[in-house]
Image (spheres, rainbow, N blue to C red):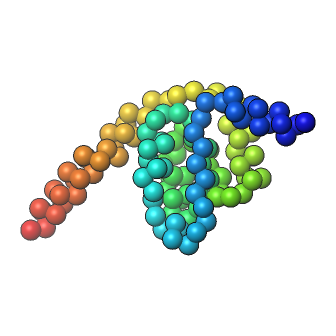
């Protein structure tokens, strides 16, 4: 019965969930889905590994709860930690500005033009 209560509470929360598989090809990439989820400002519980785990951890954003991909025990720990706070939207406008595609493309082309 406790597990069903856990699932029901999970269902009632307003957060995003992402769990990247531990396939070798995902060790050194940063999927755009990570940035899309973070840009919403909603609380995010993310199962990541490799480069993506380290990168998101270094960002140090509020309301982002990381666990090791496919680790159910780690997920439960992070979920319980998240429950201690409030599942509410936070302002991530500076994050969106920093990682906006237009800005990234502009910066990239500016760097290329400086090299020419």
Instruction: Tell me the quarter of the picture where residue 83 sits.
Output: top right
Decide if residue 81 is in sight here. Answer: no
| Residue 105 x, y percent position in the rendering | 23, 53
The residue sitting at the bottom extreme is: 24
Which residue: 11% across, 62% down?
113
Horizontal side of residue 101 vs 29, given as left or right: left
The residue sitting at the right extreme is: 1
Which residue: 75% across, 53% down?
72
The residue sitting at the left extreme is: 116
Check the picture and name the quadrant holding the C terminus. Answer: bottom left
Check the picture and name the quadrant holding the N terminus. Answer: top right
Which residue: 64% across, 27% down?
86
Image position of 53 with respect to 35: above or below: below
| Residue 112 x, y percent position in the rendering | 16, 63
| Residue 88 x, y percent position in the rendering | 57, 27
Which residue: 72% across, 57% down?
71
Along the line of sight, the residue nearer the viewer: 85 or 71 = 71
Decide if residue 47 is in sight here. Answer: yes
| Residue 44 x, y percent position in the rendering | 57, 41
Horizontal side of residue 86 vs 24, given as left or right: right
């Amino acid at each position: 019965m406790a597990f069903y209560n856990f699932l029901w509470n999970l269902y009632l929360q307003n957060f995003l969930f992402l769990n990247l598989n531990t396939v070798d090809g995902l060790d050194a990439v940063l999927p755009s889905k990570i940035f899309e989820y973070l840009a919403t400002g909603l609380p995010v519980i993310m199962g990541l590994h490799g480069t993506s785990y380290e990168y998101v951890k270094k960002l140090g954003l509020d309301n982002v709860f990381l666990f090791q991909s496919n680790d159910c025990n780690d997920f439960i720990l992070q979920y319980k930690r998240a429950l201690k706070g409030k599942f509410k939207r936070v302002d991530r406008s500076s994050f969106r500005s920093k990682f906006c595609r237009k800005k990234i493309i502009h910066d990239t082309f500016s760097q290329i033009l400086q090299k020419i």
